[in-house]
Amino acid sequence: MQRRPLIAGNWKMHLTQKEAVALAQSVAESSNACLDRDVMIAPSFTSLAAVCAAVQGARVLVGAQNIAWEKEGAFTGEISAPMLNDLGVAMAIIGHSERRHIFGEDNAMINRRLHGALQGRILPILCIGETLAEREAAKTLSVLEAQVRHGLAGVSGERMHQVVVAYEPVWAIGTGRTATKEQAQEAHAFVRQLLGEIFEKNIAMAVRILYGGSVKPDNIDDLMAQPDIDGALVGGAALKAESFDRIVRFQ
Ligand code: 13P
């Protein structure tokens, strides 16, 4: 099954509006030159409107770094799907390890956010990944299984076509220590097999599974050559036009 690659940049808590717009314009040029793949950028909430306006008409998707489960109400600090729709935002990163580990978001909350996105016509990227302690205790696959099962609870097979999964081992995020292509492939193949058990095989075969964690210009080609790696969720290297351009143009 041919899955369309997706290269996504997570800008985290970086860049002013002006810097974000300049980088977005550069990413749009890279993306326009690569018609066989999708490109997404996720600026901070304060830059979303300006970035959406700057890339209007270009082949680049804009994503939010989180999303609320309710449409509106007394939820201080949260941003809802209708607010994101209003700007032209297409996707949302959900369950990022920084949300899980710094801000205490658990699988139940992440599942609510995922449903909020799907109901609000925002495509979710569900992030999963084990910590170093969990990997060393040989708990990687059981942690991933729990994150996938709880994160996707209540999602229909039909809706699953709109979900992207991102495997981001916590120990590889921002550390310069990438998972080897074998470690990444093993986790991706496990997740795809699990999706086949939860949904149907043909649905599992169609879901895009991204790898994230110290993705750089010099490792993207090897990672993308793995059969179950369908794209990348890039942090640090997405903040520089040149390095992200090279990642978008993976071979
Ligand atoms: P780095 O690419 O900086 O390791 O970050 C990965 C990440 O967390 C993307 O969501």
Image (cartoon, rainbow, N blue to C red):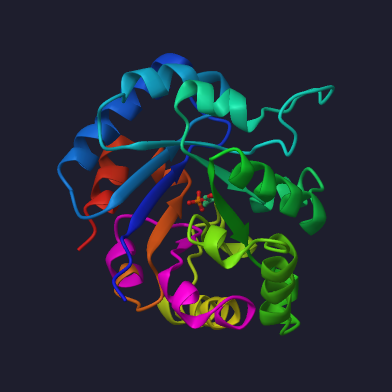
- Considering every residue shown, the one lying at the far left of the view is 33
Question: Residue 187: percent from the left, percent from the top?
Answer: 54, 78
The residue positioned farthest toward the right in the image shown: 74
For image coordinates 74% across by 72% down, the residue present is 146
Q: Can residue 62 be seen in this view?
A: yes
Residue at screen point 18% across, 39% down: 32
Q: Quadrant of the N terminus?
A: bottom left
Residue 2 shown left or right of residue 186 in the figure: left
**Residue 180, can we see it?**
no
> Residue 7 placed where, x, y %?
36, 52
The vertical placement of 55 against 162, above or below, is: above
Residue 207 forms part of the magenta stretch: yes
Magenta segment range?
A: 196-223
Q: In which quarter of the image is the C terminus?
A: bottom left
**Location of residue 112 with respect to 178 vertically, above or below:** above
Left or right of 132? Residue 86 is left
> Is 23 a magenta residue?
no
In the picture, measured across the screen, residue 215 lies left or right of residue 224, that is: right
Q: In which quarter of the image is residue 205?
A: bottom left
Total numbered labels: 0
22 and 71: which is toward the camera: 71
Where's residue 195, x and y in %?
57, 76
Which quarter of the picture shows residue 58?
top left
